[in-house]
Image: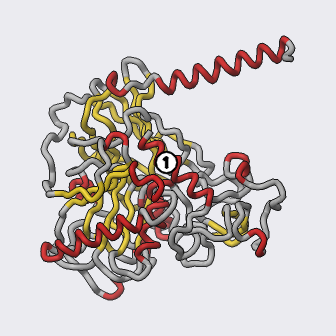
Amino acid sequence: MLNNTNSFLFVFIILTLNFNLTLYSQVDFDNYFRNGALRIDYFHGGTNNSEFFILDELIEEEYWAGNKKNLLIPFDYGKYQVQVKEINEDITIYSYNYSTLFSEWQTIDEAKNISKVFHETVLIPYPKNKVLVEFYSRDSLNKLNLKFKLNIDPKDPYIIREKKERFNSISILDNGNYENKVDIVIIPEGYTYQDSIKLINDVRRFKEYLFNTSPFKENQEKFNINLVFSWSEERGTDIPPKNIWKNTVVNSRFYTFYLDRYLMTSDNKTLRNIASNVPYDQIYILVNTDEYGGGAIYNHYAVCVSDNIYSEYIFTHEFGHSFAFLADEYYNSEVAYDNFYRYDIEPLEPNITTLIDFESKWKNMIEGDIPIPTPGTKEYLNKVGVFEGGGYSAKGIYRPQFDCTMKSISVDNFCEVCKSAIIKMINYYSE
């Protein structure tokens, strides 16, 4: 039986929880937004320890594919956060987390010596009234700091209303209304018009790759996949050290940050113009080559090669990054980053830990007799534990299981912690 003090605390906690839940549920899409998206294109630049934002264009788009019931993101993920505030009521009505190529570039040696500018995009549901859009960036302690503000009038005549690029598209997987599905758009890169049959067959094959893997296979009905037919003048992609340069539609290239297998693009403007032809939550670029490589950045885009023997692994591994903010769990492979994670704070990614705040990670998934840290011996190989090595470091950073698709070249091998993180993200978009 509760005493008076405990009774008061109990009632206070319940009221507080109900109040917070009420606040969260107060954001009614129809009160603040209409169908369609407002695309904010901007330039983001700086050095390893400085940054600035410059507005490029505001563009009205036909589709915003997000879930109308989940307008405030519940995950503390990503390098950046955007908050949209209704000016008259002074409340946050939309939030979104993401990372970018610029944030990765800041961690390499080049960023210590020069400044560089990248083009980036944020999509928000189209507001009915004037809004304040705030851009936040995390510091070295992962604290969000306000960096840039925009006052936007949705009736501004200088918001661009025309579609920049018009391309045909085809549905590869259609499970219904895009408002409560995970909507993936596939952007072909290095496919010529003559490769159209190959492209369709490739994309259908990659759809099967995704749904060969748990937990995607158990949740296939929550996904839509569309392919946009954006043709390149030449097949393949750029490989600068080999002096191979191809005229391709989104200008991808290997050797991003001087890493041979890192295949990315800096042509965000073209990429977003093409993607805007269909509803999308996630962008996936499929590059027509048999070279090994790919890459991905959370809520930015993912890249995979079409015809490498490891393409199935690359496709699901990179989607783990871009979709669910999963960290790389390997630690014995060349990377471009310099001390990507600090050892004295807890990383934000759900599948690695420094044990600084392990309560916030997968501690509740570990059986009582599993030692922490967990030795990589036979009896623990298939158990959830705390195995040292991950996040590009052999010491001081820990992963949940001995092996995982985020650690090694393996198919249908996401660990239980990664599966849990993926399922939460699927539900965020679809429920």
**Residue placed at 77% from the left, 18% from the top?**
9
Query: Picture quarter containing residue 332?
Result: bottom right
Residue drawn at point x = 47 percent, y = 70 percent: 110
In the image, residue 312 above or below residue 373: below
Residue 343: in sight, yes or no?
yes
The single residue placed furthest to the top in the displayed view is 4
| Closer to the camera in the image, 16 or 198 | 198
- For this view, does 409 lie left or right of residue 279? right
Residue at 28%, 34% in the rendered image: 126
Q: Secondary structure at mark 1?
A: helix
Please provide percent x and percent y for residue 287: 30, 73
Which image quarter holds the N terminus? top right
Image quadrant in which the C terminus is located? top left
Please name whichever residue, 25 or 78, is drawn nearer the observer in this view of the structure: 25
Provide the residue designation for mark 1.
425
Report x, y in % for residue 42. Answer: 31, 48
Q: Residue 15 lies in what quarter of the image? A: top right
Q: Amino acid at mark 1?
A: Met
Instruction: Reply above or below: 53 against 227.
Output: above
Is any part of residue 357 visible from this angle? no
Q: Residue at x 70, y 59 (%)?
A: 343
Q: Quadrant of residue 55?
A: top left
